[in-house]
Image (cartoon, helix red, strand yellow):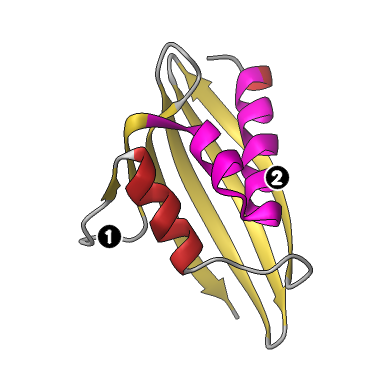
C-alpha cells in the first residue's frame, strides 16, 4: 500500500460514513475483515457484521465534521490521525486509526482509538 492508496480508502470511508449505505460500507472491508471499536471489546468480524455494527451506531450526515492526516504507511498497514467534531452537543474527538489491507485493497483489520478532547 502507498499513501495514495490509503487516501483513496479514506475517501471511501468518509463517503460510507456520510451515506450509511450498506454497499459503501461493505466495499471497504474484506469478507472476513475485523473492526476493532475499543480496547478489550470483541471486534466485529466479517463484512456483514461490520455493516450491521456500523449501522447500529451510525452518525447522520451534517452532525459532524471530520478531517484527517496520513501519518504513514508500512507494507500493507496505514496509520491515520483524525479529528471528529460533533455539532450537537458540541464535542471533539482525536482519533488514531490503524488500517491493514489485503492484496485487493480491502480492509482486513481496522482498529480505532479515540478520545474526547477537552
Q: Nearer the viewer, residue 25 or 4?
A: 25
Q: Residue at x 37, y 45 (%)?
A: 48
Q: Give the numbered dot on residue 15.
A: 2
Circle 1 packing at 10 Å, graded few (<14), some (14-19), many (20+), is: few
Q: Is residue 50 left or right of residue 115?
A: left
Q: Earlier in the sequence, mark 1 or mark 2?
A: 2
Whether tag 1 and tag 2 are in contact, CB under 8 A, the answer is no
Taking the view exactly as shown, the residue that stands out farthest to the right is 62
Q: Give the numbered dot on residue 74.
A: none
Give the label, 1 or 2, closer to the camera.
2
Q: Nearer the viewer, residue 29 or 79?
A: 29
User: Would residue 15 be counted in the magenta stretch?
Assistant: yes
| Viewport quadrant of the C terminus | bottom right
- SS at badge 1: loop
Relative to 117, is 76 above or below? Answer: above
Q: CA distance from mark 1 to mark 2?
A: 26 Å
Q: Residue at x 43, y 11 (%)?
A: 103
In this figure, which residue is indicated by the disc labeled 1? 39
Relative to 106, is 71 above or below? Answer: below
Instruction: Give how far across and how far down residue 12 sits, in percent.
Output: 66, 36
Q: Residue at x 49, y 61 (%)?
A: 55
Taking the view exactly as shown, the residue that stands out farthest to the bottom is 89
Circle 2 packing at 10 Å, graded few (<14), some (14-19), many (20+), is: some
Q: Is residue 47 left or right of residue 43?
A: right
User: Would residue 117 be counted in the magenta stretch?
Assistant: no
Q: Is residue 55 left or right of residue 68?
A: left
Relative to 39, is 109 above or below? Answer: above
Where does the magenta region start and end? 5-30
Instruction: Give how far across and how far down residue 100 sits, in percent.
Output: 40, 28
Q: Residue at x 54, y 32 (%)?
A: 27
Instruction: Give how far across and how far down residue 40 sits, in percent.
Output: 20, 61
Amino acid at each position: 500500500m502507498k499513501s495514495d492508496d490509503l487516501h483513496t480508502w479514506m475517501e471511501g470511508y468518509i463517503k460510507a460514513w456520510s451515506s450509511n449505505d450498506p454497499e459503501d460500507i461493505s466495499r471497504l472491508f474484506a469478507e472476513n475483515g475485523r473492526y476493532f471499536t475499543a480496547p478489550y471489546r470483541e471486534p466485529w468480524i466479517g463484512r456483514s457484521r461490520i455493516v450491521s455494527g456500523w449501522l447500529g451506531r451510525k452518525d447522520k450526515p451534517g452532525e459532524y465534521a471530520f478531517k484527517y492526516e496520513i501519518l504513514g504507511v508500512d507494507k500493507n498497514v496505514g496509520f491515520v490521525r483524525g479529528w471528529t467534531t460533533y455539532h450537537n452537543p458540541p464535542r471533539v474527538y482525536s482519533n488514531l486509526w490503524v488500517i491493514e489491507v489485503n492484496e485487493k485493497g480491502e480492509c482486513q483489520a481496522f482498529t480505532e482509538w479515540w478520545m474526547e478532547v477537552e
